[in-house]
Image (tube, rainbow, N blue to C red):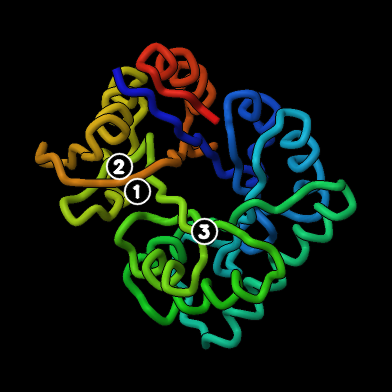
Amino acid sequence: MTNYSIDINADVGEGLDNESHLMPYLSSCNIACGGHAGDTFTMTEVVRLAKEHNVKIGAHPSFPDKANFGRKIMEMAAADLYTSLKQQIRVLQDVLRTENAMLHHIKPHGAMYNLATKDEKTAKVIVEVIKSIALPLKLYAPCNSVVAEIAKAEQIEVTYEAFADRNYNNDLSLVSRKNKNAILEKKDEILRHILLMIQHQKVSVIDGVEVPLKASTFCVHGDTKNALEILKYLNKKLPKNNIIIQ
């Protein structure tokens, strides 16, 4: 039987204060750095937990919009968006230097993440920000997305991401959170969902069709109500299917 190696990530530092519970079951994390949530205190707390549990640390920048938790598209000039993203990541980098930890990757948040999958202007800004950082950072992004293709063209390593706890539309966009079937919460359903993606590089979309999808990092949202239960279940069940989390 084939052996697989995957990463499990979660978005953290978003004000839920559940990181100490989640971190033992993650291999990487994405830390909110002030755009949609988070401040120096929360970043410091989460970085310390990530170090304690040997979890790779990523920056999770967003449109600067705490009122809407970064989940609405903001119309911003490219230069303004660049400045905002750069500043958000710089704050996390300052914390990392103080805590003697390393930045591993960048994963945009919310509306920006979704917009960058198809909007070239937004994608280019994100890539330019990564290029400006004097570290070989990875980008977490969906396969075949505009931002992933631009990043690869600029010699940035892309780790393809999929969502363990979200349903997909036929075009591989995420089902809107406004719809009641957007979020998966049943553990066995999530396991089937993720096994299909890992073992067959396909995802079963909302109308039941299986669509090709490639990913090696899988996100469980920290604000999914039973996130801890899901993570514990995946950490137990995936190794039994010859899937290593690392």
Q: Earlier in the sequence, mark 1 or mark 2?
A: 1
Q: Which mark is residue 147?
A: none
Q: Which residue extends farthest right? A: 98
Residue at 49%, 19% in the rendered image:
235
Calculate the distance from the C-alpha at mark 1 to the C-alpha at mark 2: 5 Å
Q: What is the crowding at mark 3: few (fewer than 14 residues within 10 Å), some, or many (at least 20)?
A: many
Tell me residue 121's x, y (percent).
Answer: 42, 82
**Inter-mark Cα distance, 3 to 2:** 24 Å
Q: Residue at x 51, y 18 (%)?
A: 232
Quarter that holds the C terminus: top right
Q: Nearer the viewer, mark 3 or mark 2?
A: 3
Q: CA distance from mark 3 to mark 1?
A: 24 Å
Which residue is labeled 2 in the image?
Answer: 182
Q: Quadrant of residue 79?
A: bottom right
Between 228 and 29, which is closer to the camera in this rendering?
29
Q: Report which residue position mark 1 lands on.
A: 177
Circle 1 Cα neighbour tier, 10 Å, few/some/many (<14 / 14–19 / ≥20): few
The x, y position of residue 133, in whole percent, is 68, 70
Q: Nearer the viewer, mark 3 or mark 1?
A: 3
- Residue 148 figure quarter: bottom left
The image quadrant where one finds the N terminus is: top left
**Disc 3: which residue:** 139
Q: Is residue 174 above or below residue 74?
A: above
Question: Which element carries disc 3, helix, strand or loop?
Answer: strand
